[in-house]
Amino acid sequence: MSQTKPTASDLAQAEASKGLDRRRFLNSAALAGVAGVGLAACNDKPASAPAAASAPPAAGSATAAAASTAVSTQAGLHPKPGELDVYYGLWSGGHTGDVRVLGFPSGRELLRIPCFVPDALVGWGITNESKAVMGTKPDGSLRYTVGDTHHVHASYKDGDYDGRYAWVNDKINSRIARMRLDYFVCDKITELPNVQGFHGIFPDKRDPVDPAINHTTRVFCGGEFHVPLPNNGQDLDKPENYRAMMTCVDAESMEVRWQVLIDGNCDLLATSYDGKLAATNQYNTEGGVKFADMMSAEKDACLFYNIARIEQAVKDGKFKTYGDSKVPVVDGTKKSNTDPKTALTAYVPVPKNPHGVNASPDGKYFICSGKLSPTGTVIELQKVLDWFDGKLDDVAKAVVADVEIGLGPLHTAFDGRGNAFTTLFLDSQVVKWNIEAAIKFAAGDKNAKYVVDRLDVHYQPGHLNASQSETKNADGKWLAVGCKFSKDRFLPVGPLHPENEQIIDISGEKMILTGDHSVRGEPHDFIIFKRELLRPKQVYNIDDFPNATKDATSGGITRNGKQVTVKMTSQAPSFSMTEFRFKKGDIVTLHLTNLDKVEDLTHGFAIPKHNVNFIVNPQETKSVTFVCDKPGVYWCYCTHFCHALHLEMRSRMIVEA
Ligand SMILES: [Cu+2]
């Protein structure tokens, strides 16, 4: 049971009794890299102390003690055998290049969706169909075999997820992948031109102009690293000419619609519920290429994009193109956008090197975190729109609060009851704070108690998200926190530790830590949403595959010189052909249709010594192409357990010399 696990306070007490303040040690280590370059506060204080001297007394400063006796008020934390979770979670996998599907609140991993990196379970990067999605070189080999996924977001309708698509970024090769949420597969990947280090990603929630379009039609992509334009060998030593861009991709076609040239490096992205605004939190507005240069300015920006104006500028031909790319690029740099009446962008100043920007579910605010400043910055969207309309003289006035919340604030989630939850990387805490109280405090009401609660997490949290948090229907039930270091929370397994995804009950006033879950590195961002928003299909439609073989007798082998095509089927416990014969040097394309219609009856197909292994799900067809370069007998066998006679499910491939 969850309440019998050691709690945060147990751990803190154990640490104290051992005279070993691991948390402070971690803080020191985490800070070492930025010492002397302008960190806004020091951390020589006990872990449970309020974050900053000038912050109001934290109602939750004794939270850890309370948590040791508190019990989760929510049923169903760990579903009993046979019970289903009530939420789906979509987790980015980091440099495993995949997306993980979790059941929530159990935290059970249900599936990994390979996107950018080959996957041996399903044959992603082996089958012709997956290679076509991933992209190949002229010789047919994969263009890339590495990826780095950070942020997963799903398509919207009426301000909530509609169950059509999810998208994920690849930071290494600046690619965006789309997943169909009916079959939980990646169906398209687009490589973005002109950018490097594509990081933040967010779909729009409705059209900025057409009120009839109240669903996602665009996906915005933040470019982090600034590079020469075009990046073809010119301007190598002229970093003043390097630039980053924000990119708009069409949600349906996955074509790149347009890009915006900007100052600074994009981190995360948020979109407004009215469709009018997108924003990226910008660090390195200095344009530095060295560590200290990137942190010299006291303020960076939350950069707002006026979507309707950008698209009008593209229509009016007010754009450039770079290098071989035909994508229109409009000028969103600060110096070209000083007149609010024509500006495409607005740079709202926020404390230096911000991390994270998140939209509140009431549609009113974007919240940026300070990272190097112990503050959360609340930006009122109506005021940003007022600036674009010439009704606000200074866009900096759109900041309605910039309040101290703790050390190393990164990302923010919401409970739909006016509270924000922000990860504090250096404090190893989540802080719960009330947005309207923070605005009152910032306006001068020093009695406004905006910090509601603090909870120790283990350790060094990065992303967090709450159930339904990034929709209008934030339900304030569960919070998941991606802790970057697990240290002593799990059995040691050598030098590579798992990460610790912690689950917190946020249904009450105080947060209650209810679960530790080890995860393979290295998830970043994730979303959690109600299971009824998806309509998954468990059996394919055979007619969706033009190369399907629809019955066991209609397949066969056709030869055209050295090109050989095999069409065969699987039906437990046998393949339609028990034997096929080739000659050395043949180039074989084999199409396999799984005729089984029974849910959960997947087959595999492996050919020894030919680097072939893939699965076919019920009524699915896949193909592989390989060269028969070694005479001999090869037993092709089913790799995915299907039947009592699974071991006998084989075909003999004979390659003649
Ligand atoms: Cu089988």
Image: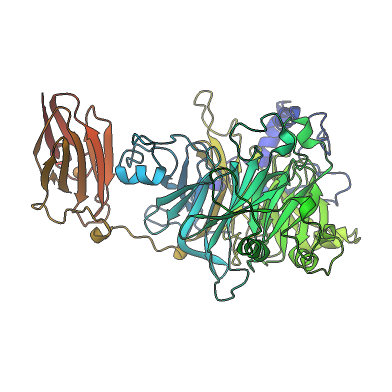
Task: Give percent across and percent down for residue 93.
Answer: 50, 41
Query: x%, y% of residue 190?
Result: 48, 48
The quarter of the rendering in which ligand 1 is drawn is top left
Instruction: Name the quadrant containing residue 596.
Output: bottom left
Colouring scheme, one of rainbow, by chain, secondary structure, one colour: rainbow
Does 129 appear above or below 653? Answer: below
Q: Is residue 59 visible?
A: no
Q: Quadrant of the C terminus?
A: top left
Identified at 78% across, 31% down, the residue is: 292
Residue 448: x and y in percent read 85, 60
- Horizontally, residue 467 falls left or right of residue 26, namely left
Image position of 119 with respect to 318: above or below: above
**Picture coordinates of residue 601, whole percent (x, y):** 24, 51
The quadrant holding residue 365 is: bottom right
Position of residue 559 in the picture relative to residue 369 (left or right): left
Instruction: Tell me if 174 is positioned left or right of 342 in this view.
Output: left
Residue toward you, 304 or 467: 304
Closer-to-camera residue (102/488): 102
| In the rendered image, the vertical position of residue 3 relative to residue 315, given as above or below | above
